[in-house]
Amino acid sequence: MTASQKIKEFFKRHGIFGFLVLTLFILFTLSFISERTPLNDGAGYDGAFYYSVAQNFSTDFWTTGYDSFRIFRIFPFFLINLFFSLLGIEATHTNLMLSMYVLHFANLSVQIIFFAKFMQLNAWKKATKAIIFACFFFNYFVLKNCGYEPFQTDAFAVTIFLVSFYYLQCGKFTRSLLVSFLGIPTWPTITYMIWLLYFFKDPFPQTARRLNVHTGKAIAIVFPLMSVGAVATLYLLHKQPLLESMLFCKASPPLILASAIDWGAFLYFALRSCDFHFYSPLTYIREFFRQSIWKKAIIVALPFAAISIFLKAHTNDEFYFNEVAFLLQTLLRPLKYPLVTPAAHVCYFGILPLLALFYFRDFTRDIFNRRPGYALAFLAFLFFATDSEARHVIPLLPMILVPLGCVLDKANLDAKAATSLIALQVVLSHFYIPINVEGTAEALATNDYYGVAQRYFMNFGPWMSPLFYTVWLSIAVISGFLVYLIVKKRKN
């Protein structure tokens, strides 16, 4: 085969993905050269801490230390500081911003490489691969937020989970676990999820007892009841200010009740066909010992304990995180407005939640037909996904995209359907909408969420104004109808 024939064959086989990757890099580059957050000279609000780690880690870590929450969020920023110190580079603002740009592009390249490996591992059709590629890369976070606010852990947490999850799927467990440890100083939840998938990776006996509960209906009842119970508890304890601080608005009992009813109805509609069952807790305990999973747990626990003790030794008395408060906000935020969570997820992820909902029965069947740990990890994912701040689940997307890809592949979507879905995904990413308009800096500085700063805060459900909530709920409904029209003819 001649060189020209090889080139033609390459573009014939990989042309569509070459085009998608090129488009991704162009749009990703635009997010870095167009605009950036006016807060802290481009570092952002949360980014100010990560900026300080990159600038002063060598000094702060050994002297004042970091608080007990953010000390588990210092990767990869401390590497910048160590790299600068090693090469004698001055940690100026220009150098720090440039280093983050380089890291983000390197990080994106790693994601593309391992995404391609995932595609080879699953051997899906071209149309399926293209749709999954768009769901993973063509969303608000990748096409807009990374460049707008570069000092953040999210993008790197995604990569750590993606690489570790890939090795787990390949059966390369040592590599998977070694990579997963990077999650401890980045976003510990992804580390725990990998370990859960690893510990319960082997199938249980066919005689293993399952819960005699309709999974979908149980979740549809339990989640809203937990939310209402949390609201009632706060009222009984006269903690309305805490409730309002989590909702970012005045608490209105009638609106909260309406939101709870709508949220429960939505979950019932979405999960009613999820008629698969979890194993009983006793079964997991029995298999934990029968399969000698406890030995694996000890092997993992030893280095985890060493890392945790080392980090805690450099922890100061400041406290920014409370587990109970985090659980409360996860339960309460879906009640800010009726159906704010699905609206916020479409705003952040585009067509991904719509596809998952449309194929939910087959999607969950694929998950439950995998390993026992997958079901537990999926339940944890569902809990985090109930929070209207959709970014909390973005590092876990690979775990969801794999079963979704398998379902879409069986749906046998053609090139026309795939192209339509990808186009809709790009439109929903709203990367083309500028954030910094006149008055943005002042609004951010004064915590004025509901004015011009909504161009930024609308992307995070708890901060949506009534207007933008209405807009995105309408967009979610229209987009759901469009997805239905695109895929209904091919749905099995």
Image (tube, grey):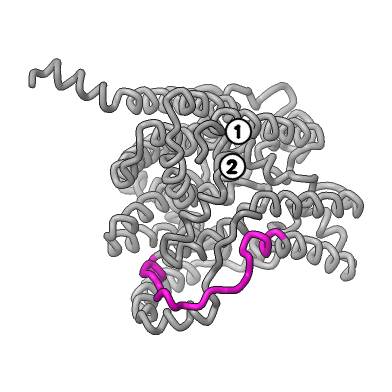
Residue that appears at 67% across and 52% down: 387
Horizontal placement of 148 versus 175: left or right?
right
Q: Earlier in the sequence, mark 1 or mark 2?
A: 2
User: Within 10 angstroms of label 1, few (less than 14), some, or many (20 or more) residues?
Assistant: some
Residue 229 x/y as whole percent:
80, 66
Residue 353 x/y as whole percent:
58, 42
Residue 89 x/y as whole percent:
36, 40
Circles 1 and 2, Cβ within 8 Å, touching? The answer is yes
User: What secondary structure predominates along the stretch shown in magenta?
Assistant: loop
**Numbered tag placed on residue 358 in the rendering:** 2
Horizontal placement of 430 versus 160: left or right?
right
Based on the picture, tell me whether residue 206 belongs to the magenta stretch.
yes
Identify which residue, 201 or 51, lies in the foreground: 201
Identify which residue, 133 or 431, lies in the foreground: 133
**Numbered tag placed on residue 128 in the rendering:** none
Amino acid carrying mark 2 in the image: Phe
Residue 140 x/y as whole percent:
56, 34
Identify which residue, 270 or 423, lies in the foreground: 270
Residue that appears at 60% across and 38% down: 348
Mark 1 lies on a secondary structure that is helix
Residues at marks 1 and 2, CA–CA distance in whole angstroms = 8 Å
Residue that appears at 65% across and 31% down: 481
The residue pinned by badge 1 equals 484
Residue 250 can be seen, yes or no = yes
Mark 2 lies on a secondary structure that is helix
Position of the N terminus by quadrant: top left
Horizontal placement of 252 versus 380: left or right?
right
Based on the picture, tell me whether residue 67 belongs to the magenta stretch.
no
Amino acid carrying mark 1 in the image: Tyr
In the depicted structure, whether residue 320 falls above or below residue 36: below
Residue 62 can be seen, yes or no = no
Q: Which residues are magenta?
A: 198-220
